[in-house]
Image (tube, helix red, strand yellow):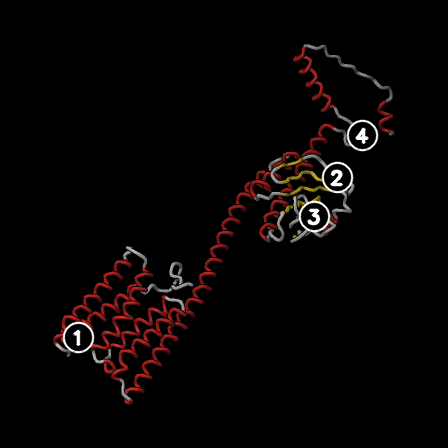
Amino acid sequence: MKLFLDRNKTLLPRIDVIYLLTRAITLVGISWFTVFGDYPQQDTTFFAFLLGTFVLQMAVFLMAMKGMFDIKAAYLLAILYDLIFVPIFVYYTGGVASSFYLLFYITISVAAYVLTFWFGVAVTILIIVSYMAIIFPDLTIHDTFGVSMRVGFVLVYFLAISYASEYLRRSERRLLKLFDTLNMRTSELEKSQAQLEMIYENTRILASILDTESVVKEVVRILGRILQFRYFALILKDKNGSYYYRARFVNGSSNYHLKAIDIAQMQLVQKVCDMGEPVRIRDVGNREDYQHLSQEPGSVIIVPLISHGQNNGVLAAESDEKDVLTERDIQMLSVVARSAALALENAELHKRTEELTINDELTDTFNYRYFVQKLQEEKRRATRYNLPLSLVMVDIDWFKSLNDTH
């Protein structure tokens, strides 16, 4: 059973110094009574002994404050000491008439602050029992009301201190929980910012790549190494509206082989392309409109590849755990998807531009530029392998008329 309240992680004030200060004030009162108090002369040695034990107890508590041993043990020792010392001091200073019963309130305050509720109740009951045992022989009918008031006030005081302490601790727990949440959110924000900076830097590099194959590999690298998805796919749509896997990544292994997709089993992909909006599915285990890549059906995010209003496919990222992909994952994946769509479009335009430089736009046949380029290549090949090279030219009669007509 837990004896002490948690003191390791707290925003509440540590009462060690305050408690030691109250002990010092109490020591002054005891010293004054020992020197100037009205009591039999033969009890001087006894009061000096009580004074010495009180000083020793304070020294032990001070050692605990300096870290020589557990402060909790020092508090428990102080409470046990008061349960013995205060009743004895009250007895020798007048019993019912003694004002030193007020020292019990210090003990109750400490017990209510550092002990759990039921152990605090036990300490309070022991205080009341010991006090009543000390004063009972001298108790008269005239003292009954005053003693009852003292006992009642002790109980009320303990309950008030316990309630206030518990209320403060509940408020503290809520505040600490809020701080923990804030720290977690701050950590996530810093992580997201770092990822975004890396993504933007890599997407800048992505925009400079003019080869489709290199663009695809760079997208796979960003999703795998930077965003650290274990399962994802790049799905593209061809001119006929058919979908195919352009790249897949499954648990550390990438696959760039083209694979056609049966859209009847992947209607979710077509839906995302038609809507032009990303979707997040928390559990794809029971869905028939999506074929997952992960070993176990979990959650998935599908983001469209949109460039200049044209949707050319999707990025799909998966997890083998349910409901673990977050809004932040959607945002990160959307940033990559926009850059990937633009890079793929640029690579396709670059490819078309290169084709236009060597193909006749009207007949789609190779032009003179291509002829010169290939001739130079064949000449270098013949020189390198020491082979003969022949050039055959064919003249077609009336070709201009044929070309103009057809």
Sort mark 4 into few (<14), some (14-19) or many (20+) by Cα contacts within 10 Å: few
In the rendered image, the vertical position of residue 183 relative to residue 371, given as above or below: below
**Considering only order in the chain, which callout, 4 or 1, is on the residue closer to the N terminus?**
1
Q: Residue at x 71, y 21 (%)?
A: 374
Of pointers 1 and 3, the one earlier in the residue sequence = 1
At mark 2, the secondary structure is: strand
Across and down, in percent, residue 194 comes to 51, 46
Q: Who is closer to the viewer here, 116 or 29?
A: 116
Which quadrant of the figure contains the C terminus?
Answer: top right
Q: Amino acid at mark 2?
A: Ala
- CA gap between label 2 and label 4 equals 31 Å
Residue receiving disc 3: 309
Are the residues flagged by discs 3 and 2 in contact, CB closer than 8 Å?
A: no
Residues at marks 1 and 4, CA–CA distance in whole angstroms: 120 Å
| Residue appearing at x 68%, y 10% in the figure | 386
Residue identified by numbered label 4: 363
Residue highlighted by disc 2 = 260
Residue 307 in view of the camera? no
Task: Please tell me whether residue 102 is drawn above or below residue 401 in the rendered image.
Answer: below
Question: Which amino acid, mark 1?
Answer: Phe
